[in-house]
Amino acid sequence: FEGEPVNASERRPALHVALRSGLGGSAIARSACDEATAARGRMAELLGDLQAYAVTDVVNVGIGGSDLGPRLA
């Protein structure tokens, strides 16, 4: 939540919780929420592209521990 790098392979914080809700008032938290908002915009663009090409099947691969996979289904 404080923005400390916890992902050793990518050397970045694991702030995926920002995709679900705000993290608080720190500058790091605001930055994470801004990044999450931008990611949502990119996902919306991808959805539009998929719909334009009449994609009928999607494979969702996840590592578990998230409610995003069930929401996608």
Image (cartoon, rainbow, N blue to C red):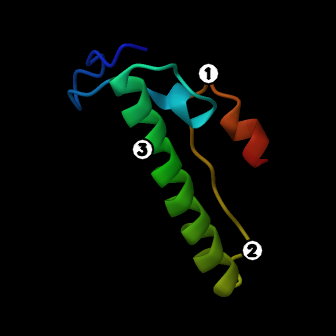
For disc 2, the marked residue is 56
Q: Residues at badges 3 and 1 in contact (C-beta under 8 Å)?
A: no
Crowding near the residue tagged with mark 2, few <14, some 14–19, many ≥20 C-alpha atoms within 10 Å: few
Question: Quadrant of the rendered structure where residue 5 is?
Answer: top left
For marks 3 and 1, give the one nearer the viewer.
3
Of the numbered discs 1 and 2, the one sitting upstream in the chain is 2
What residue is pinned by disc 1?
Answer: 65
Which is nearer the N-term, disc 3 or disc 1?
3
Classify mark 1: helix, strand or loop: loop
* Amino acid of disc 1: Gly
C-alpha span from label 3 to label 1: 21 Å
Relative vertical location of residue 6 with respect to residue 58 in this rendering, above or below: above
Residue at 74% x, 74% y: name it: 56
Kind of residue sitting beneath label 2? Thr
Q: Amino acid at mark 3?
A: Glu
Q: Quadrant of residue 8?
A: top left
Give the answer, above or below, for where 57 lies relative to 63.
below
Q: Nearer the viewer, mark 2 or mark 3?
A: 3
Q: Earlier in the sequence, mark 2 or mark 3?
A: 3
Residue 71: percent from the left, percent from the top? 77, 41
Q: Disc 2 on helix, strand or loop?
A: loop
Mark 1 vs 2: CB contact within 8 A: no
Q: Is residue 65 left or right of residue 54?
A: left
Q: Say which mark, if any, is on residue 35.
A: 3
* Secondary structure type for disc 3: helix
